[in-house]
Image (spheres, helix red, strand yellow):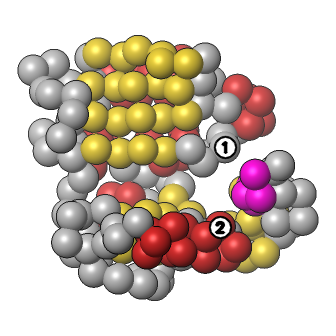
Amino acid sequence: MCNRSKVPRIGIVCFEPHSQTRESLKTNLELNGIDAIIMDCAISNSDGTIAFDTRHDTPSGMGEVRHSGRGTETPVRTLDGIVSDDGVPSPTVIMSDIVGEEINLLRGASTTFSSPSTRLAYIVTHDRPLERLGSSKQEVEELLRSYGFDELEYLRDNFLKAKKSGQTGSL
């Protein structure tokens, strides 16, 4: 089970399995007066645990999911499960930068992404980690289209904005 640190007033839910990054996130939210739920779990395509390797942190200090089984056992949930079981409302906007696990986020959130209330998604794609999972940017795009997102645009090389037609791009 993921632990929540706060109840939001503006409807922000963050998922952060890396303890150092989670503490920095909490501090930044507090310093900026932003109320949010912070859940200490990873998001993927199944519920359980996953190896989260912090020994090989990226330059920005974030760990990475390792499908080799090496790393700290970390709770992992599907976004669909969190929305249906934990009382977290279906999101209107999703932002994801989860180093290769973006494909598993999409696979474990078909109901959430297909919901009419979920109208905008920003997904950072990572070619090499996606390839290690037997996936690609193209599969990310195909899944988003299958969930009703029909306006896909790369804002940068790996920063994908996906929108459903007739929906506004800002809140």
Q: Amino acid at mark 1?
A: Val
Q: Nearer the viewer, mark 1 or mark 2?
A: 2
Q: Earlier in the sequence, mark 1 or mark 2?
A: 2
| Mark 2 element type | helix
Q: Which of 13/147 is in front?
A: 13
In x, y percent, where is residue 159? 53, 26
Report whether residue 134 is seen: no
Residue bearing the label numbered 1: 99
**Which stretch did the figure color magenta?**
60-64
Q: Which of 116/39 is in front?
A: 39
Q: Are discs 1 and 2 less than 8 Å apart at CB? A: no
Q: Is residue 95 above or below residue 55?
A: above
Q: Main secondary structure of the magenta part?
A: loop
Name which quarter of the figure residue 150 lies in: top left
Is residue 2 covered in magenta?
no
Horizontal side of residue 26 vs 170, given as left or right: right
In x, y percent, where is residue 151? 29, 15
Q: CA distance from mark 1 to mark 2?
A: 15 Å
* Quadrant (top left, top right, bottom left, bottom right) of the C terminus: top left
Count residues near mark 1 (Cα–Cα under 10 Å), then give few for <14, some for 14-19, many for 20+. Answer: some
Q: Amino acid at mark 2?
A: Thr
Q: Is residue 168 above or below residue 101?
A: above
Residue under the point 61% across and 76% down: 23
| Mark 1 element type | loop
Q: Is residue 159 above or below residue 121?
A: above
In x, y percent, where is residue 43? 51, 59
Count residues near mark 2 (Cα–Cα under 10 Å), then give few for <14, some for 14-19, many for 20+. Answer: some
Image disc number at residue 21? 2
Residue under the point 42% across and 44% down: 95
Horizontal side of residue 138 vs 164, given as left or right: right
Q: Is residue 96 above or below residue 123?
A: below
Horizontal side of residue 44 vs 141, given as left or right: right
